[in-house]
Amino acid sequence: MNVYIKSILVFNVEGEKRHVDLTEGLNVITGESKSGKSALLEIIDYCLGSSKSTIPKGEVTKFGHLFALILKFQKYHLVVARKRFDNDGKKQMYLYRTSQNIIPKELSMDLFTEENILSLEQAKIELGREFGIAVTNSTENIDAAKNEPRPSVRNMTSYMFQHQNLVASKFALFYRFEDSQKREQTIKQFPVFAGWVDQQYYNYRLELDELLKQQKRNEKLQQSYYKSTETIKRNLLNTFKRYYMLVGKSLDDNLSLNKLLNLRRSLPDFTRESYLSEEMEHRYGELKKQREELKQQRYDIEMGISNLELSHGYGQNYSSNLKSLKAILNHSLHHNDSYNCPLCGQGVKVLSQKIISLNDSKQWLVKELASVKGQGNEFYLQIHNLNMEKDKLNDEIRRIGYEISKIEAITDRWKKSKKLDNEVVYARAEIDIECKRIEEQLVNLRKNDNESDIRINELNRLIDGYNLYSYYSQAATFIKTNITRVIEKLDFEEEFRPADMNFLLDTFDLYHYDKESKSRVYLSEMGSGANWLACHVSLFLSLLHFFAIQEKSAMPSILFFDQPSQVYFPEKIFINAKEKSNDVLKVEQIYKTIIEEIDLIEETIHFKPQVIITDHVGELDIEDYNFEDYLRKNWRGNNKFI
């Protein structure tokens, strides 16, 4: 995204203004400690919609009533501003867009009127649209649709800011990644910021997730349906048998469900001989016999359960008695294997034998207690299994009872009306209704499966059309190559040369691959602040380069380094060219590398990304470049931001 910060401004209540004007390319603000350098990054962050103000307390916050940025896009300017956090800044932001040129020194408080005020949340949305975020909902999981935050400029800042305490850290690479949710969102939204996907992509993913979940639900439904096929078939078979019983015919019990459904279309007709049939009486007798047999089986099981419970009670009493005996033995048992007379010291054979006998009894008691304890679990398991069998028998008894009652009801109606043909018609209707219900259920299951499969295949084809796997692969290769190339210019230990740097896009971890040991060396495992700084600088220059060359990237081509020279001389200000140390040369090489990377990016995209550096260094002799060309502010002595 071709945009840069044209100016950072602070207004007081009276409208008095302080501002730092910036350009494309490298911008250096240098000065002493407490001159206001680090406040610039926090002001930018605050004006980009931070949920809290981290602007350092002091002169800046005492002076500051309203903080603002002028953002220069290709064809227009955008002014974003917020009042102090404790004075409406917590909830509101100003956004003003104009195609006219804005001169920072001429900008006044008059611009910030009610018509340019938005709520903080709406302002962040509008700001994201200005940067080109084309996605409003990046969820891919239907269950998380309501909780998933939209891609926001707030997650973009992780790529843009390298704070003073972060730029050379061994434990962290990205801004505010200590918040695991922010980390997860930023990683997930990488394709959005790179411009690889649009809202339709996530719509497809969300629909696919819903269909796949529905498909699993259907599969479970089918599994449940097929598991209960025997029950369905048995119930349908009984419905058929009632009809066959009325028309005086017998029916094969081994017919499959499909054959029963087809049989509905070729039922035998009712004839006069049906009146003379004994099929109903035979069927009635068979059912009553089956029910009695099942009741006997249930009685046998109930007796078994009763005996087990009784035996278990005896076992518990036995165990309780054994425990009492053990307590007595532990209290009274002699702890030696023999007994000697306390007067003469001679062994008493009879008592010694009793002691041995008691010890043997104790060992038996311990084993018996362990055995009784184990038996208890077996009792519970057997009783549980018998209760399960009893429940199944009760279900079958109820089913047969229902069939018996059906025959009895038919018989009663027949006796009253003496018209068996009415019962036949009723029984045929029952068969029709039951068969249609089962067939419709089967058709719906097949229909849902077919329609879902077609749409799932179509969605997979549409999602594959975004070619994300290829994009990720190319991005990983580009970033790896770029980091390795850049880090070779910086102060990176010989132990890790030649560098083989890798950045994992699924976790955002950075490591060097050691070919000798065939192992990964992560940032936290490297020694030396110089190594950590080199990793940070090379990674973020590479990410800046990567996003800049993406045709549809929403990421602003802006990068902020706060005091990168601190690793070498955090208190050094002026550099004597005649006394230039090795540390100074390394710092100059950092700046030269940054300028070269900016120029390299410009060759590809024809505009310069913006890199802002706040630092202590005041003068550098950068080979082939004039440091003064990049110096925007030099705050020393009484010359400060505020």
Image: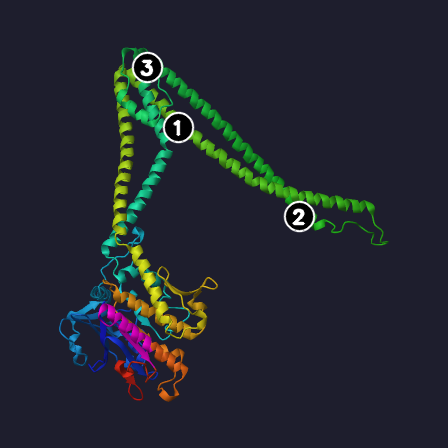
Q: Which amino acid is tagged 3?
A: Gly
Give the answer, above or below, for where 525 lies relative to 293. Answer: below
**Residue 99 percent coordinates (x, y):** 13, 71
In the picture as drawn, the residue positioned furthest to the right comes out as 344
Query: Label 1, label 3: how many angstroms apart (C-alpha)?
Result: 25 Å
Q: Does 610 appear in magenta?
A: yes
365 relative position to 260: left or right: right
Classify residue 33 by image quadrant: bottom left
What residue is shown at x 41% (from left), y 75% (from top)? 530
Q: Earlier in the sequence, mark 1 or mark 3?
A: 3
Q: Secondary structure at mark 1?
A: helix
Query: Label 2, label 3: how many angstroms apart (C-alpha)?
Result: 76 Å
Q: Residues within 10 Å of mark 3 (few under 14, many from 20)?
A: many
Label disc, if present, on residue 9 of the rendered structure: none
Mark 1, residue position: 398
In the picture as drawn, the residue positioned furthest to the left comes out as 100
Give the answer, above or below, for where 589 lies relative to 409. Answer: below
- Range of magenta residues: 591-615
Mark 3, residue position: 248
Q: Which amino acid is tagged 1?
A: Arg
**Residue 231 percent coordinates (x, y):** 37, 30
